[in-house]
Each structure stands twice: as structure tokens, then as C-alpha cells.
Image (cartoon, rainbow, N blue to C red):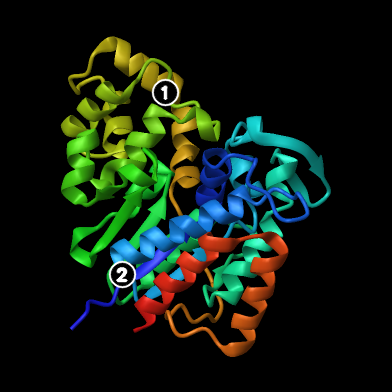
């Protein structure tokens, strides 16, 4: 009997990678760019074919830079802001990608892949919620290291990491995270807070790199333990490291809440089971394929999903 597994896509992470990985000479019959659409469809075909999920969900950034995270750390993703509006920050996205996003959403929906987002939250938070609540094993597909915090062998939650490209996918389990970083998935948030992440505008603790962060977590177990040790002159800790941690106390007091993904959102009703595509959606996909020139990419995705549906 085939194992039932749920696959959660960090959708924006994947279509950004597709956009930058597939030449922009890939165009529709009318000359519109479709490199992100076709690249994402090829990714889905590969992922479904290789990992054989029974459920598939496209998790969506309803808010790519939630104000509640910005309130805690104003630099959060600030370098990626194009401009501000009354509704919030607008992300700097290449025009050629931005115009493909609505088509991506329509194609996913017609393929029977639910697009799930929650107002005021990022796709990471949707993934955290769905992975935590899942009663079946979960594969999270992402190029975002922050989601390593969700890896959990006891619940069969893995990350399929795309950071090295689709031809070099990494399957991260508890042991793989520990081998890669020297910390457990349960310690990953504390590790990431100290290390920082320029791609997200997280400063980290000045002068504390990965090696020092790993050593501190080994000695004191958690960020709370490290902060408590830094504040206690009776605890053995190097003066330089103690000084750096003390200087970053304000940042350390809020950063964990920014890096931790939500696990308790109201995601509404959806059905992620991979099933045969209804005739109306199949006809709509044929029309999309012709209009946008999706060709073999859409054919491969449909074939992989049909095989997974059984």
C-alpha cells in the first residue's frame, strides 16, 4: 500500500527560483514572458513524480511582510520593499514576474492544487500550521532555511530543500539538519536568530557567527539559557561573547517571535487530495496552454498529477 504523504509548496520561493532559472526568452505566442509559469510547472512535475505525494497544497504569501513582524524588527525584509501604501509594503518584484503570478495562481487552481493563504501572514506560517496539524507525513518544498525548524522525524515532517537547485535537491531530516548545522531542528530558530539572515533583514548578534552560535547552544541548550548565562556573572562565558550578547539584548528579546513560524492559523477549508482533473478544469487548462504557450511543461505536470491520482 502506497504511503500517504502531504506536500506543501512554498510557492513564491519556487516561482522566484523558476523565474531566475529559466531564460526570459521563454514566451507565450503573444510574446509575454512565461518562464516562471513553465519553470514552476516543471518543478511540480519533478516533485510529484519523485516524491509521490497523495496531497498537494500551494501555500501562498497573503502578506509577504506582515506588519506585526516589522513592528518587532523594523529592518525585516526592508531591503525588498519597493514602496509603501496604506495597505502595507509592496515588494520589489520584476514586472516580468509580477504579470505571471495571476496566471500561476489560475493554473494551480485548475490543476486541482489548492492555493492556501491567510491574511496578515506569510506562506511560511501557513506551512507551519498545515505541517503541525497534519495527520500524515509531510514534505515541505522550499528554498527558505527558516523552515528547517519544522523538521521532525517523530512526526515524519521533512524539508525538500531547493537551495542548490532542482537537480540537487536536499532531503532534510533531523540527522541531516544536525549534520549540516550542528544543531537540532528544535534549536534552529535560536541558531538563526543569533546568526542573522541578511536576505530577511535580520541583523543577528554582531560578532556571533554560525560556529559561535553552535557552541553556545551546545553549552547552554537554548537561547533562553544563553541569555540567562550572559546575565549571570557566575556562569563561565567568554567576556567578549558575553558583551556581544548583552549589547544585542533588545534584538534577542523580540527576534524569536519574528523567526518562528505560526502553527495555529485559521486556514479555512480546502481539499489537497490529488484527484483526476474535472472536465471543465481540463478544458480550461487546454485553453491556458494555448493562450500562454505552456506546452510540454503543463503536459508533464498534468501527467505527473494523473499518475499520483492513480
Q: Are marks 2 and 1 in contact (CB under 8 Å)?
A: no
For this rendering, which residue is in front, 38 or 48?
A: 38
Q: Is residue 232 visible?
A: no
Quick one: quadrant of the N terminus?
bottom left
Q: Where residue 291 appears, x then y in whole percent?
A: 72, 65
Residue 205 image label? 1
> Alpha-carbon neighbours of circle 2 within 10 Å: few (<14), some, or many (≥20)?
many
Q: Is residue 210 left or right of residue 129?
A: left
Q: Where residue 305 appears, x then y in whole percent?
A: 42, 74
Regarding mark 2 in the picture, which secondary structure is present there?
loop
Q: Is residue 261 left or right of residue 180?
A: right
> Alpha-carbon neighbours of circle 1 within 10 Å: few (<14), some, or many (≥20)?
many
For the point 67% across and 78% down, which residue is it? 284
Q: Earlier in the sequence, mark 2 or mark 1?
A: 2
For the point 34% across and 38% down, which residue is it? 190
| Residue carrying label 2 | 52
Quick one: quadrant of the C terminus?
bottom left
Q: Judge whether 32 appears above or below 41 on screen.
A: above
Q: Nearer the viewer, mark 2 or mark 1?
A: 2
Q: Is residue 137 visible?
A: yes
Q: Judge whether 201 appears above or below 269 on screen.
A: above
Regarding mark 1 in the picture, which secondary structure is present there?
loop
Q: Where residue 205 appears, x then y in whole percent?
A: 42, 23
For the point 33% across and 21% down, which residue is it? 209
Q: Judge whether 129 appears above or below 192 on screen.
A: below
For the point 25% across and 49% down, which residue is it? 172
Residue furthest right in the image:
86
For this rendering, which residue is in front, 263 or 167?
A: 167
Q: Where residue 100 appears, x then y in whole percent?
A: 69, 54
Residue 142 image label? none
Amino acid at each position: 500500500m502506497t504511503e500517504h504523504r502531504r506536500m506543501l509548496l512554498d510557492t513564491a520561493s519556487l516561482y522566484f527560483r523558476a523565474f531566475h532559472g529559466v531564460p526570459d526568452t521563454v514566451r507565450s505566442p503573444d510574446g509575454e514572458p512565461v518562464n516562471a509559469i513553465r519553470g514552476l510547472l516543471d518543478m511540480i512535475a519533478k516533485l510529484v513524480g519523485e516524491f509521490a505525494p497523495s496531497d498537494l497544497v500551494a501555500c501562498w504569501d497573503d502578506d509577504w511582510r506582515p506588519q506585526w513582524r516589522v513592528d518587532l524588527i523594523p529592518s525585516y525584509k526592508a531591503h525588498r520593499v519597493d514602496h509603501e501604501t496604506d495597505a502595507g509594503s509592496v515588494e520589489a518584484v520584476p514586472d516580468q514576474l509580477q504579470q505571471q503570478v495571476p496566471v500561476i495562481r489560475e493554473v494551480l487552481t485548475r490543476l486541482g492544487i489548492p492555493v492556501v493563504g491567510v491574511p496578515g501572514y506569510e506562506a511560511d506560517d501557513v506551512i507551519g500550521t498545515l505541517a503541525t496539524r497534519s495527520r500524515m507525513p509531510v514534505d515541505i518544498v522550499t528554498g527558505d532555511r527558516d523552515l528547517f525548524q519544522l523538521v521532525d522525524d517523530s512526526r515524519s515532517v521533512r524539508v525538500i530543500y531547493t537551495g542548490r537547485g532542482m537537480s540537487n535537491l536536499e532531503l532534510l531530516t533531523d540527522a541531516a539538519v544536525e549534520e549540516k548545522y550542528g544543531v537540532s531542528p528544535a534549536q534552529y530558530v535560536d541558531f538563526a536568530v543569533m546568526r542573522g539572515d541578511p536576505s530577511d533583514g535580520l541583523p543577528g548578534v554582531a560578532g556571533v557567527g554560525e560556529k559561535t552560535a553552535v557552541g553556545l547552544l551546545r553549552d547552554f541548550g537554548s537561547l533562553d539559557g544563553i541569555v540567562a548565562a550572559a546575565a549571570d556573572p557566575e556562569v563561565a562565558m567568554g567576556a567578549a561573547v558575553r558583551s556581544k550578547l548583552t549589547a544585542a539584548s533588545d534584538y534577542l528579546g523580540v527576534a524569536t517571535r519574528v523567526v518562528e513560524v505560526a502553527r495555529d492559523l485559521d486556514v479555512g477549508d480546502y481539499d489537497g487530495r490529488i484527484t483526476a482533473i474535472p472536465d471543465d478544469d481540463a478544458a480550461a487548462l487546454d485553453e491556458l496552454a494555448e493562450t500562454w504557450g505552456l506546452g510540454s511543461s503543463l503536459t508533464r505536470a498534468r501527467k505527473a498529477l494523473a499518475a499520483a491520482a492513480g
